[in-house]
Amino acid sequence: MKAALLSRSFWRGAAGLLFLLALWEIFARSELFTQALTPPLTSIAKVAWRITLDGSLPQNAAYTLARVLIGLSLACLVGIPIGMLMGRFRAAERFFLPLVSVFMPIPSLAWVPLFILWFGIGDVTTLLVVGYAATFPVIYNTWTGVRAVNPLWVRSALSMGAGQRQLFRSVVLPGASPYVFTGVRLAFGRAWIAVIGGEMLANPAAGLGRAIFDAREFLDSEVMLASIIAIGVVGLGFERVVFQSIENRTIARWGMVSAAGAR
Amino acid sequence: MGAPFLLLAAAWEAVALAGVFPPKLFPPLETIFSTLAELAIDGVLWAHTEGTLLRLVLGFLLAAAVGVILGILMGRFQVVEDVFLPAVSFAYPIPGLAYAPLFVLWFGLGDMPAILLVGMASCFVIIINAWKGVKAVKPLWLRAAGVMGANERQMFWKVILPAALPYILTGLRLGLAQAWRILVVVEMLTAVEHGLGWMIFGAQEFLNTDVMLSGILVIGLVGLLLEKQVFERLERYTVVRWGMLTA
């Protein structure tokens, strides 16, 4: 019963998507705009296939993804300890919270021109911008997570004779983990945006953002659209496959979230 | 509250005065603030800020209009949902920024592509939330209103809209934050006439680090004001007052 329902909504969705794609195809072939600017689907697909086969699209995607992951790791390295300190110690909270709330609303990409002057064009600038974008969601969520740990657990662990270290490892860390995880997931989304901007403005080497930016010079809108689609597919795929499986393996298994395991 | 900033400022000043980096690239605070004051008195700063805010508001209004209407229609009518949901959920995770070069090709440089890009980047989250909000209206309320003889119009204004409003506002809030995050770069990429992003980008050519830092400072300030003043107020005046959320 449920499977039948699911497949019906699947077919409906597929029909809807086909309808929109057909609209685009008619629009593109009508030559309302020149086809160089709004290419029909067939030529987008052809170009996408070509740049996949010659390896440039996968290579660019790999570069972009690697930059996101390195930036994200930087953000975790900085963000999780700061967030934990803020959640555990009032003094740390009083020190970092004003800084965080002032720097958080500054879009990371606003720093790009300055970072270019400081660190030159290249990977350092791109990674820093990605890291900047990703750090704040991690800090914010870790901080919230530590404060959300049930105080009863902390008190009972303490009264059962747990040391600070044990308390941290066995109670606070697992207790805060769902929030930390949400923060990292959110940070991935931010980093994914920042990396595109960072590559366009500050990175001469490969990358999907760079590919789109360079394709503009040659009016190569097929490459642009193919790369945009690749950005969507890689981002979504990574988020769904990797994050979901990490979540299932860690916090769902520890019994911190019930929904993830049930799905 | 002020102590962390004083510490940060002192550290900055120490590094700047120690001359580790050339002062042109790492100016001391007094240079930054005198530049900021100069730009403010000149009126240059206001022109750029005004340009940025105007673009933010126009792009966001566009996204809000399209997003809320489409989202509600998707939630209310199955056909609309069938047609748009797959496309929306596919386009949602693609950063709006990725379209920037394409939009420049399509619409040229300047305000038009900038506003459209900002609108595009922020509309998907608004659509998704409005759609979810309408879907989440309690069927009991709909049935009760129907039984008591509400027509389609009353149903919409008295039941669906207030019930979906917390979701819609969440969407608008996320959308505005999204718009704000990419607006600055969009200005750099589309070469608008006045805008804080453009001011920062232009200053790079002349190694005017003090102008860049002033721009970043103003951007941070505007962002903070948006968050604290616009959203929190909006939320207080509407949903909380109607009893849909507890403050």
Image (spheres, coloured by chain):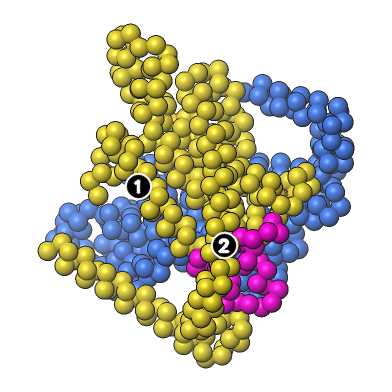
Farthest-out residue, bottom? A30
Residue A87, placed above or below residue B198: above
The answer to if A107 sits in the magenta stretch is: no
Circle on res. A59: 2
| SS class, disc 1 | helix
Q: Main secondary structure of the magenta part?
A: helix
Q: Report the chain holding disc 2.
A: A
Which of the two discs, 2 and 1, labels the residue nearer the N terminus?
2
Q: Is residue B216 left or right of residue A53?
A: right
| Mark 2–mark 1 distance (CA, rounded to whole Å) | 25 Å
Q: Which chain is yellow?
A: A
* Residue B65 visible in the current orientation: no
Tell me which segment is drawn in magenta.
A203-230
Residue type of the residue flagged with mark 1: Ser
Q: Is residue A160 left or right of residue A30?
A: left
Residue B241, placed above or below residue B111: above
* Residue B5 visible in the current orientation: yes
Farthest-out residue, left? A1
- Residue underneath mark 1: A245
